[in-house]
Amino acid sequence: MRVVIFDMDGTLIDSKKDITVSINYVREINYSLLPLSEEFVVEAINMHNRNLSKLFYETDVYMQMDKELFEAHYHEQCIKNVYLYSGVSSMLEHLRKADVKISVATNAPTQFALRMLEHLEVKHLFDIIVGADMVEESKPNPQMLNMILEHYGFDKNLHKAWMVGDNSKDVLSAKRAGIEPIFATWGFSADAPIPAVAKKPSDILDIVL
């Protein structure tokens, strides 16, 4: 058995515009702050160590009112501009046809992952989709990956698994789960911290098949 676990934002889908719109909505409504650029938001999200509440809303902690307003706004916003990266749909189809098990492990809430992947007509391709709300600790903690591997009855002595992502948290979670990381350079970050690099989605096929 072969298993490929995918990160979502910046790996499967480009969601930066909608994320930025919703963050800026919270900034304006709750704090009367000027809007942030998409580039700033993506850089902040990809930082290994960061305080996003400070970077996005200038608060030391993530306030409940900000969380609630963001999620209410993003529920409607998240499917307005999101799109699959070129070649992703074909790559996923090829993996399925080759009997590779594919799943998603995202630090986004599960409700948004399901909504976006359904909107983009690829949700049905994944066996299991795990968001941050389904575990105690999100990536780089390996809990999500371990949950998915347990779902398959994964045996490291018999099976092979990879984690495909676009930032250091994906790489660390893979290593901590004892599976191989693959860094996707086409998404939110082009700077790969590991040798196993996919410059385009079809490169995943060359590595896995």
Image: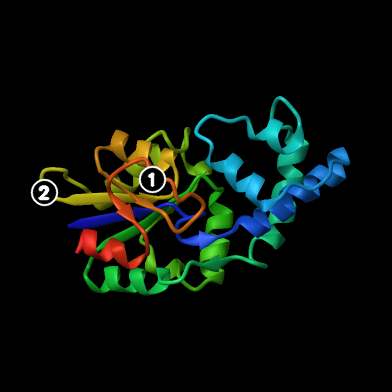
How far across and how far down the image is residue 140, in percent? 42, 35
Residue 192 badge:
1
Q: Is mark 1 on a helix, strand or loop?
A: loop
Name the residue nearer the viewer: 56 or 95.
Answer: 56
Above or below: residue 116 compared with residue 164? below
Q: Which of the image's four quarters has the N terminus?
A: bottom left
Packing grade of label 2 (10 A; few <14, some 14-19, many >=20) is few
Quarter of the picture containing the C terminus is bottom left
Identify the residue position indicated by label 2 in the image. Answer: 158
Q: Residue 97 carries which label?
A: none
Q: Residue at x 61, y 56 (%)?
A: 16
Q: Is mark 2 on a helix, strand or loop?
A: loop
Which color scheme does this rendered protein use?
A: rainbow
Amino acid type indicated by mark 2? Leu
Amino acid at pointer 1: Ala
Q: How far apart are labels 1 and 2 at the CA level?
A: 29 Å
